[in-house]
Image: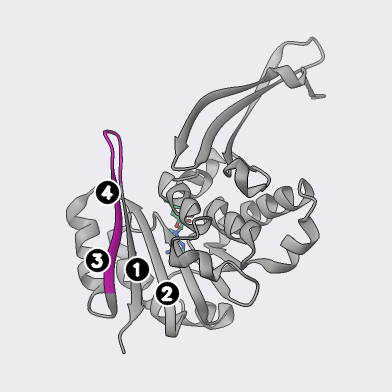
């Protein structure tokens, strides 16, 4: 069926909120068929960096078919804030000399934000999520005057937690980003093995997650403490969410 967009006016911001200095927008755009009857809706999330950063907004089409891998989680946007905040150690990794690996990237919002700020980033996920990650990278680069530079610093790789060979292929990282990956207790051990396999003696791992089932998240942190030095450095408590951030560092 031939589809055309009705007009630019037909893109609506359904929902908008600030998460720190970054804006989270949920948008809908309607398309119509030949008889001009609206017949399709495209939904997307737009993450807008603070205007002082002069960075392009990141648009991410909603992929409902990918479940949790197709949505942007607020713990990722909380971390985006820290990438651009000079008061946090993360900002020191936002240059092309440091290697950043993101595990469980999903839409890639966090990896794309890190690349936009200046990092060399490898975004990773399960095999069925890689097309989305490549598509979102392509979309961001094509709409960005710095697209070629971004493309040269940003890659996408398969990384199933617990796979030694895939972790070896991705290689050691200076900074590992891990947002909202604690929701499946059965893969906690595999995730910790992967974080360890990607680490050298000086790697910093940053965990960000929303408290949904406190005993399960607490259990992960306890298990992490058997392999890493663990430091909680941030907790944001609001009526509707509770995001916690931790640093993990290899034990010396
Ligand atoms: C809740 S989503 C978080 C996505 C993104 N990090 C964010 O915060 O917006 C969890 C991500 O972990 C990935 N994931 C789940 N189990 C995995 C596994 N065993 N190995 C690798 N990635 C996995 C999912 O595909 C999904 O993209």
- Residue at 69% across / 51% down in the picture? 135
Front disc: 2 or 3: 2
Is residue 9 in view from this perspective? yes
- Residue at 28% across / 37% down in the picture? 238
Q: Which residue is mark 4?
A: 211
Disc 4 to disc 2, C-alpha distance: 22 Å
Residue 182 magenta-highlighted: no
Disc 3 to disc 4, C-alpha distance: 12 Å
Mark 4 C-beta closer than 8 Å to ligand 1 = no
Disc 3 to disc 1, C-alpha distance: 11 Å
Dominant secondary structure of the magenta stretch?
strand
Front disc: 4 or 1: 1
Q: Which residue is mark 2?
A: 204
- Residue at 50% across / 60% down in the picture? 86
- Residue at 70% across / 49% down in the picture? 140
**Which label is found at residue 247?**
1
Question: Is 242 rendered above or below residue 138?
Answer: above
Q: Position of residue 64 (x, y in %)?
A: 53, 38
In magenta, the rendered stretch is 230-242
Disc 2 to disc 3, C-alpha distance: 15 Å
Mark 1: give few (<14), some (14-19) or many (20+) Cα within 10 Å.
Answer: some
- Looking at the picture, tell me which residue is in the foreground, 52 or 15: 52
């Amino acid at each position: 069926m031939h589809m055309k967009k009705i007009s630019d006016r037909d893109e609506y911001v359904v929902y908008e909120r600030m998460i720190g200095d970054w804006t989270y927008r949920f948008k809908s755009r309607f398309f119509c068929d030949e008889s001009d009857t609206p017949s399709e809706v495209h939904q997307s999330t737009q993450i807008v960096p603070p205007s002082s950063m002069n960075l392009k907004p990141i648009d991410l089409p909603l992929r409902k078919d990918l479940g949790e891998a197709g949505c942007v989680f607020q713990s990722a946007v909380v971390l985006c804030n820290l990438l651009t905040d000079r008061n946090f150690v993360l900002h020191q990794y936002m240059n092309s000399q440091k290697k950043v690996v993101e595990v469980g990237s999903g839409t890639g919002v966090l990896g794309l934000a890190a690349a936009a700020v200046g990092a060399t980033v490898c975004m990773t996920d399960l095999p069925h999520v890689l097309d989305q990650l490549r598509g979102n990278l392509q979309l961001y680069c094509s709409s960005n005057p710095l697209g070629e530079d971004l493309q040269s610093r940003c890659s996408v790789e398969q990384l199933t937690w617990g796979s030694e060979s895939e972790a070896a292929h991705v290689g050691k990282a200076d900074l590992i980003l891990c947002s909202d990956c604690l929701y499946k207790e059965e893969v906690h051990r595999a995730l910790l093995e992967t974080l360890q396999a990607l680490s050298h003696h000086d790697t910093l791992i940053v965990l960000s997650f929303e408290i949904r089932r406190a005993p399960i998240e607490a259990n992960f942190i306890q298990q992490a403490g058997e392999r890493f030095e663990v430091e909680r450095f941030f907790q944001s408590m609001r009526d509707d969410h509770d995001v916690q951030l931790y640093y993990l560092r290899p034990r010396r």
